[in-house]
């Protein structure tokens, strides 16, 4: 006896589940919302291709990334749109399903985002791999037809002080030694010459030990400053010998020449101070002499 099997969908009526259609309503409302219109105008897929190779790999025993590549790029657009901090953005993301759709995710309330620095981590990773020129080309290709003044370029320039610190003789001398050591190393590598030896590593270790102490005695400060002066003097002599041998092959930029001149002036001033001499117009930073 043969029995003909048929799919259950062919012999049963379609059962409507209207209570599960709310997601479709959310999608429709998102499409006509302001966030939905912005999302439609963003080339998220093209931008995501630039970071896909650097996207965290999924492992069978590891955690699945919270955001897809397109979602990470969308999150970077969402932050300036909301004007909130990283923590505030994540908190708002929990309670706003349109923002979740904007980033291409649906956050399970039972599995909240535990990493409070996820926005900062995503921003740092994207900033390290996304070239601003390629970004401009992609955006221009998407929005070129809507731009009126295509020969006009507007940019946001924000100036602020960075690397603020209290200037000391030890810090200033170490900055000079550190910069000149890197210049000597790069130049010797380019010239395929052996790098001259000095006490840079030993003094670096002594400086770290000195910096870890909350209070510095006068004797320790004088000793370290004397060692830094000796190291800087030796480095200047080594650099002068390299320049004398390879005069034609060495070409410094204007910024490097300016800093090198300031470095030598710092050495002259610090040596005079060590000898209890008066110094006028002291340099407190080799970046702004």
Image (cartoon, rainbow, N blue to C red):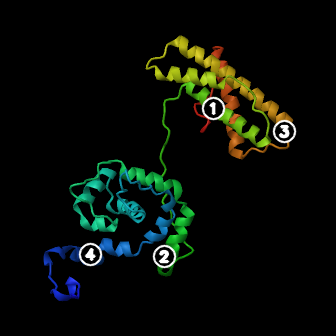
Q: Earlier in the sequence, mark 1 or mark 3?
A: 1
Q: Which mark is residue 178?
A: 1
Q: How far separated are the C-alphas under marks 3 and 2?
A: 51 Å
| SS at badge 2 | helix
| Pointers 1 and 4 in contact (C-beta within 8 Å) | no
Q: Is residue 33 left or right of residue 42?
A: left
Front residue of 238 and 116? 116
Q: Where the C terminus falls, by quadrant?
A: top right
Q: How far separated are the C-alphas under marks 1 and 4?
A: 57 Å
Q: How far separated are the C-alphas under marks 1 and 2?
A: 46 Å
Q: How far separated are the C-alphas under marks 4 and 2?
A: 23 Å
Q: Based on the displayed image, in which of its 4 quarters is residue 259 positioned?
A: top right
Q: Which residue position holds label 4?
A: 27
Q: Earlier in the sequence, mark 4 or mark 3?
A: 4
Q: Earlier in the sequence, mark 3 or mark 2?
A: 2
Q: Earlier in the sequence, mark 1 or mark 2?
A: 2
| Pointers 1 and 2 in contact (C-beta within 8 Å) | no
Q: Which residue position holds label 2?
A: 142
Name the spot of residue 155 as percent of width and height, x first: 50, 62
Q: Earlier in the sequence, mark 1 or mark 4?
A: 4
Front residue of 271 and 9? 9
Q: How many marks?
A: 4
Name the spot of residue 159 as percent of width and height, x first: 49, 50
Q: Is residue 284 left or right of residue 112?
A: right
Q: Which mark is residue 246?
A: 3
Name the spot of residue 13 as percent of width and height, x first: 15, 87
Q: How far separated are the C-alphas under marks 4 and 3?
A: 68 Å
């Amino acid at each position: 006896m043969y029995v003909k099997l048929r799919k259950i969908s062919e012999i049963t009526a379609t059962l409507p589940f209207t209570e599960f259609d709310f997601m479709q309503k959310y999608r429709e409302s998102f499409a006509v919302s302001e966030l939905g219109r912005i999302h439609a105008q963003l080339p998220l897929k093209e931008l995501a291709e630039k970071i896909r190779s650097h996207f965290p790999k999924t492992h069978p025993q590891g955690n699945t990334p919270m955001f897809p590549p397109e979602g990470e790029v969308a999150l970077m657009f969402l932050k300036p749109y909301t004007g909130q901090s990283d923590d505030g953005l994540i908190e708002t993301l929990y309670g706003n399903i349109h923002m979740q759709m904007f980033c291409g995710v649906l956050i399970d309330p039972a599995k909240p985002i535990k990493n409070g620095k996820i926005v900062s981590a995503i921003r740092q990773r994207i900033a390290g791999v996304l070239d601003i020129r390629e970004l401009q080309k992609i955006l221009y290709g998407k929005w070129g037809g809507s731009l009126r003044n295509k020969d006009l370029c507007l940019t946001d320039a924000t100036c602020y002080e960075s690397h603020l610190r209290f200037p000391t003789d030890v810090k200033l001398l170490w900055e000079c030694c550190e910069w000149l050591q890197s210049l000597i190393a790069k130049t010797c590598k380019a010239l395929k010459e052996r790098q001259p030896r000095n006490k840079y590593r030993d003094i670096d270790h002594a400086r770290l030990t000195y910096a870890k102490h909350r209070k510095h005695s006068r004797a320790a400060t004088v000793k370290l400053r004397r060692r830094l002066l000796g190291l800087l003097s030796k480095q200047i002599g080594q650099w002068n010998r390299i320049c004398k041998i390879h005069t034609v092959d060495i070409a410094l930029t204007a910024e490097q020449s300016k800093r090198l001149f300031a470095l030598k002036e710092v050495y002259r001033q610090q040596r005079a101070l060590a000898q209890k001499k008066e110094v006028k117009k002291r340099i407190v930073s080799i970046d702004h002499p």
